[in-house]
Image: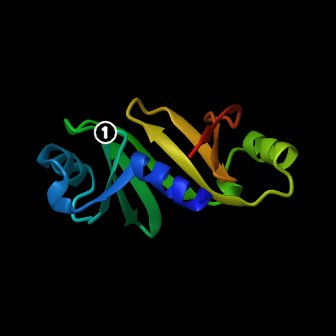
Amino acid sequence: MTVVISAICLKGFSQKLKESEVPSAVKASFEKIYPGISAKWEKEKGNYEAEFKKDGKSMSTLIEPSGTMLETEISIKESELPAAAKTYLKTNYKDRHIKGTAKITGSDGGVTFEAEIDGKDVIFDSTGKFLKEVKE
């Protein structure tokens, strides 16, 4: 039962889309920054997320319906996290499996890092200082 409820809840947060369902302003914005790269699209909280690979790295970008880019996320190795973030994770999440780590760059150029653990994203600032935990 929990699995069914989780699946229904997650469906509300993101929805897979065909490329034809993505607004032209969104596609144009993506193609301007990432020419020649194809993406898988999802709708996430009213915005559009493109998941793709560039230079062998998994990436995603979040774009508003108007075509304004909100953020870009690139998968990184755990070892690429700032030292303070690694220390925080070892202290507060010891014996927990880190599913994935990423570097997120906002439209303002600000950088944050995230580690996915137990269905939560643990967010750090650019220096590795803990900011918050966000349920996925």
Q: In x, y percent, where is residue 128?
A: 69, 37
Q: Residue furthest toward the bottom?
A: 56
Which residue occupies the foreground of this view, 136 or 8?
8
Q: Residue at x 14, y 60 (%)?
A: 20
The residue under label 1 is which amino acid type? Gly
Q: Is residue 122 left or right of residue 4?
A: right
Q: Quadrant of the N terminus?
A: bottom right
Q: Residue at x 12, y 48 (%)?
A: 24
Q: Is residue 109 left or right of residue 18?
A: right
**Vertical comparison of 49 with 112: above or below:** below
Q: In x, y percent, where is residue 41?
A: 30, 58
Q: How is the image coloured?
A: rainbow
Q: Residue furthest toward the front?
A: 1
Which residue occupies the foreground of this view, 105 or 6?
6
Q: Residue at x 71, y 33 (%)?
A: 130
Q: Residue at x 15, y 43 (%)?
A: 25
SS for callout 1: loop
Q: In x, y percent, where is residue 3?
A: 58, 61
The residue under label 1 is 46
